[in-house]
Amino acid sequence: MNLQFALYGGTLDIVRSALITGGAGFIGSNLALELQARYPEAWVVIVDDFRSGDFRNLEGFHGDCIASPLQDLQASVRFKDVTFDAIFHLASITDTTDHDRLRQVRDNVEGFRQIIEWAMRDQTPVIYASSAATYGHADSVMHESTPPSPQNAYAFSKVQLDNLAVHYLQQNPAWRIVGLRYFNVYGPREAHKGHASSMIYQLYRQMVQGNNPRIFTDGEQRRDFVYIKDVVDATLSAVEASKSGIYNIGSGTSASFNDVVAILNSALELSMAAAYFDNPHPFYQNFTQADISAANEMVGYRPAFDLQSGITDYLGWLENGKQGDRTM
Ligand SMILES: NC(=O)c1ccc[n+]([C@@H]2O[C@H](COP(=O)([O-])OP(=O)(O)OC[C@H]3O[C@@H](n4cnc5c(N)ncnc54)[C@H](O)[C@@H]3O)[C@@H](O)[C@H]2O)c1
């Protein structure tokens, strides 16, 4: 059986089987469900240790779910006779305020090392999650050639993933390995992340509970917010990137925190003033914006949602009684 993905007007030949690490998490569960919705015959295997992920994200999932930390997976033994068509590696500690350096770097990097060393056997295409956090402090648009400047252990661990990917590609130039530097992703199935969920979700929760939206003084910090549906499309299409590499996946624009509050006020028909408070995090990125031209060229990436339409789509899902009342 040869399954075809129709994306960005092109066709993408994959996938009879796929492995998704971190598949119980925000991006991983959306990816797993979308894969399954488009190609119900595909065999999708998730590996997740549920340290932040939530099984409730996987309602309707009919593949296999292996509950294990990646470090203990012994992929080459467990999957001795299995070849996947694609591996999507999303598992990671995702709370950037977790400053346990040993845990962040060991778990994130050694988990990836497990996967990539095993995937080398069959040169299975690997799509892995890097992050805009690798860029650190900046005041202009981030291009993939901008040198990394990690400001916390999480960002450092992601730089190590990128370094490992480059190393393996140098040894195996024909192998398809694609790193995706996601910017600020928001959308359905992120409630389990609590204080690490997107600011759009957190401000929405505060506002519908009748509280003024709390943002850092003076609200003029700017981030590149990208909707989950665009991220999932980009991640799937990366399997057929015209060449291996590391690509920014953002919206290509930035919006201020004051802008976010204004859009939420308008969408919710409220007029709540922002409650400003001082930012306690010295590592915090006050500006992010992705240059997405390389992703456009290599994986055909063209975001379909701007911030306004992404928030509208998301609120439609939340207001339908989905995860809006979950753990915060
Ligand atoms: N959401 C964003 O805005 C964003 C931005 C940049 C990069 N990323 C990256 O995208 C990926 C997915 O992030 P997310 O937002 O879905 O976060 P998430 O916390 O919802 O998902 C991460 C998943 O990985 C699992 N996990 C963590 N460590 C593991 C390990 N060692 N072994 C097995 N499972 C493990 C968790 O239980 C969770 O289900 C991560 O690699 C993250 O760093 C996300």
Image (cartoon, grey):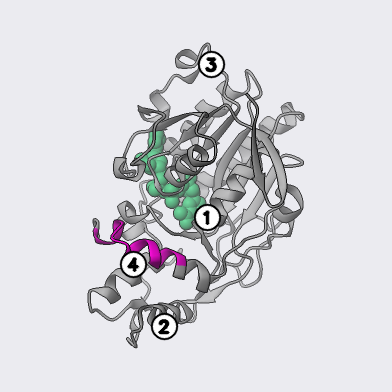
Residue 12 place in picture, x, y as percent: 69, 39
N-terminal label among 1 and 2: 1
N-terminal label among 3 and 1: 3
Q: How many angstroms separate mark 3 from mark 1 (CA)?
A: 29 Å
Q: Are marks 4 and 2 in contact (CB under 8 Å)?
A: no
Label 3 CA crowd tier, 10 Å (few <14, some 14–19, many 20+): few
Label 4 CA crowd tier, 10 Å (few <14, some 14–19, many 20+): some
Q: How many angstroms separate mark 3 from mark 4 (CA)?
A: 41 Å
N-terminal label among 4 and 1: 4
Q: Which residue is mark 4?
A: 202
Residue at horizontal 76%, vertical 28%?
A: 174
**Which numbered circle lies on residue 229?**
1
Residue 280 place in picture, x, y as percent: 35, 70
Q: Which residue is mark 3?
A: 82
Q: Is residue 304 magenta?
A: no
Tell me the quarter of the image containing the N terminus. Answer: top right
Residue 183 in sight from this viewpoint: yes
In the rendered view, does 32 fall on the left or right side of 197? Answer: right
Element under label 4?
A: helix
**Which numbered circle lies on residue 266?**
2
**Residue closest to the eye, 85 or 165:** 85
Q: How many angstroms separate mark 4 from mark 2 (CA)?
A: 16 Å
